[in-house]
Image: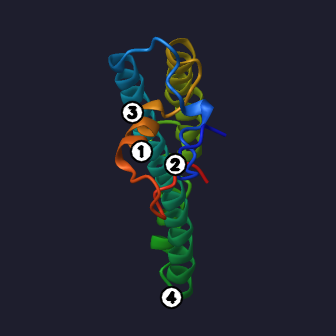
Amino acid sequence: MGEVDGNGNGLRRAEDRRPEGVDDGTVEAVGKLTEALETTERARGHLFSFHQLTGTADAQVQEAVRLLREAGHDDLADRLDAELVGRNVVRGRWTFQLVEDYDDGYYRTFREWERDARDRLLGGARHVFEAEMKQRNTTSGLPGHELNP
């Protein structure tokens, strides 16, 4: 763990500490890159939501096709089944392929760049900007303001 103050509160974990000689601008820049990666993580989550919702819609269309057939609307059910069920969402691709392409391309590259910047500039430390903000914004000795678990 980190150092301890007079109230028994941990200061900062070693893995969150700013390496010797690293300036504020570098910490802020890497923090901004990490924030951008976190935004990309959210976008990835939305992509998975899109993937799952599209699959759910396709299953619901299949149920509608079944119900149309039961109601005697075979021609409409046949056309719907042939033209919409299993249709590509973009040319040549289902949503799982979009997810895979995103993961293997943009997302992987983004993660590699963020990690490389942290490794080169902050000795691999994660969330230095946030850890320093936490240290500035907590009240020493108050419950719920501990710096470490």
Name the spot of residue 52 as percent of width and height, x first.
54, 58
Disc assigned to residue 71: 4
The residues tagged by marks 4 and 2 sit, at their Cα atoms, a distance apart of 65 Å
Q: Quadrant of the C terminus?
A: bottom right
- Label 2: state its secondary structure: loop
Would you say the residues marked 1 and 4 are in contact, meaning their CB atoms lie under 8 Å apart?
no
Q: Is residue 95 above or below residue 116?
A: below
Q: Say which residue label 3 marks.
A: 36
The picture places residue 96, in percent across and down from the top left corner, at 59, 45
Nearer to us of marks 3 and 4 is 3
Residue in view at x 54 percent, y 38 percent: 12
Return the x and y of residue 102 as percentages of the image width and height: 52, 33
Instruction: Looking at this view, name the residue that lies furthest to the bottom.
Output: 71
Q: Secondary structure at mark 3?
A: helix
Secondary structure, mark 1, is helix
Between 123 and 136, the residue placed more toward the observer is 136
Location of mark 1 (residue): 134
Task: Tell me the distance, in whole angstroms, between the alpha carbons under discs 1 and 2.
Answer: 7 Å
Q: Quadrant of residue 126?
A: top right
Between label 3 and label 1, give the one nearer the viewer. Answer: 1
Q: Which residue is mark 2?
A: 147
Callouts 1 and 2 close, C-beta under 8 Å: yes
- Residue 26 is drawn in which quadrant? top left
Question: Residue at coordinates 34% horizontally, 20% vertically from top-left?
Answer: 24
Residue at image coords 54%, 25%: 105
